[in-house]
Image: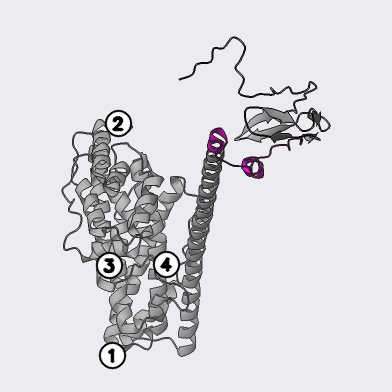
Amino acid sequence: MSGQSITDRIAAAQHSMTGSAISKAVCKATTHEVSGPKKKHLDYLIHCTNEMNVNIPQLADTLFERTANSSWVVVFKALITTHHLMMYGNERFIQYLASRNTLFNLNNFLDKGALQGYDMSTFIRRYSRYLNEKAMSYRLVAVDFTKMKRGIDGVMRTMNTEKLIKTLPIIQNQLDALLDFQANPNELTNGVINSAFMLLFKDSIRLFAAYNEGVINLLEKYFDMKKNQCKDALDIYKKFLYRMTKLSEFLKVAEQVGIDQGDIPDLSQAPSSLLEALEQHLASLEGKKTKELNADTRASTLSSAVSSLSSTGMSFSRMDEKEKQQALEEEQARLQALKNKEDRASFRDMISVLFEKLASGGAGENSETQLSAHLPLPPRPEMQWSQPGEKKLTGGQNWQNKTMSTTQWSPAPVVPPQMGQMGGVPVMAPQPMMYNQPVLRPTNPFAPMPGAQMQFM
């Protein structure tokens, strides 16, 4: 199925009649058309999340209603739209999702009646679980891991030991839900699932970057921890190594489906000797007989591991900065296009008003000055004339000449025709009119015309 269905058009018309712009935008973003939600509808909904007079619960509920549809296309696009708003919308959108008791309940969703219905339904169930886990993570820590500050002075690098050990498993759970999407290149066969995969790809980079920094902080604190803390930290580190392998497989899929290799970060694993050093240290704390590394060797191993993981972190940061730069360039292009559109509209309005005034004679003496100030018209040659005599009103019905003379016209030098632009249409500059015959005026302006009959009441 391609294109908007009759149902889509009817639903959009209903929302237009009721004046619900948000509902109409949601409907337009989640049509039956087998392609990702259109950017203009997503941009409008993002704008809505930043408006204080917009009802965020109503917006979210409208998206939830669309997931009750029987079509896999509509449901998948509703999830994509929700994910997009969680990533790029105002934070109060994800705050509301985190505050809800229930989110997407699509564990049993299945579209049996459409092409690709069975295959896409599987990915819908996995995708909805990830979005639920993403909202749950925000509920637990009141922060979106994909948006938190990173670097040496970032959130995960400065977190204390106790909080760090509680936070890293939450990141692990969210990353597990993301990697469980498990789409092979042969299964990314349409614009809908491809849109979802791109959002997951971007989330995976940012999420693992926070995860990576938390593990670096954990390793730096490890040899100063208590026994129970070391046990938990060692378990976290082992799971981290496993997830790094799974992420590598996920990124290989991204490369195979056309994502530029320069946008895919490099993953550098810590040397295997680090894991051995961590296990030996824990064994010594538990009183087991083991040969623990001396302080210098242990410090050298730790330094090498931190250096490798920091290199991975820098690779993630470069990808993040590149995306920010692309977003900035797109925003500047959009603002420039909007400015050009407003300038054209303003010019058309100005021309319309000026011509209305000229047509009605209401522009006054300065109408030509106003027009020439805004249009590239050539100047009109001024008429030079002298009038040595004038008429004098003497009363009654007769005009008498004080000085009988005729008006003498002295036109300015003829200027070659020049072309101008008026509203984008070429126009020819008007040429001066020349009068060589004297102007005759009747002595009695009230005298009847020849052949006319005067009637008196």
Q: Tag on residue 287?
A: 1
Q: What distance separates the C-alpha of mark 1 from that of mark 3?
A: 37 Å
Judging from the image, what secondary structure is the residue with disc 4 in? helix
Q: What distance separates the C-alpha of mark 2 from that of mark 1?
A: 67 Å
Q: Tag on residue 209?
A: 4
Q: Tag on residue 238?
A: none
Kindly indicate whether the residue at mark 3 contacts the one at mark 1 (C-beta within 8 angstroms).
Answer: no
Of the two numbered discs 3 and 4 on the same chain, state the one appearing first in sequence: 3
- Residue mark closest to the camera, 1 vs 3: 3
Q: Quadrant of residue 344?
A: top right
- Residue mark closest to the camera, 1 vs 4: 4
Of the two numbered discs 2 and 4 on the same chain, state the one appearing first in sequence: 2
Residue occupying image coordinates x 48% and y 62%: 320
Residue type at tag 4:
Ala
Of the two numbered discs 1 and 4 on the same chain, state the one appearing first in sequence: 4
Looking at this view, is 183 or 37 the one in front? 37
Residue corresponding to mark 2: 1
Q: What distance separates the C-alpha of mark 2 from that of mark 4?
A: 39 Å
Q: Position of residue 285 (x, y in %)?
A: 31, 89
Q: What distance separates the C-alpha of mark 3 from that of mark 4?
A: 16 Å
- Please, is residue 438 above or below residue 161 in the view? above
Query: Is the image coloured rainbow, by chain, by secondary structure, or in one colour?
Result: one colour
Q: Tag on residue 137?
A: 3
Residue type at tag 1:
Gly
Of the two numbered discs 2 and 1 on the same chain, state the one appearing first in sequence: 2
Kindly indicate whether the residue at mark 1 contacts the one at mark 2 (C-beta within 8 angstroms).
Answer: no
Q: What distance separates the C-alpha of mark 1 from that of mark 4?
A: 36 Å
- Please, is residue 313 above or below residue 43 in the view? below
Residue extent of the magenta highlight: 355-383
Pick the quarter of the image with the C terminus: top left
- Reply yes or no: does residue 356 show up in magenta: yes
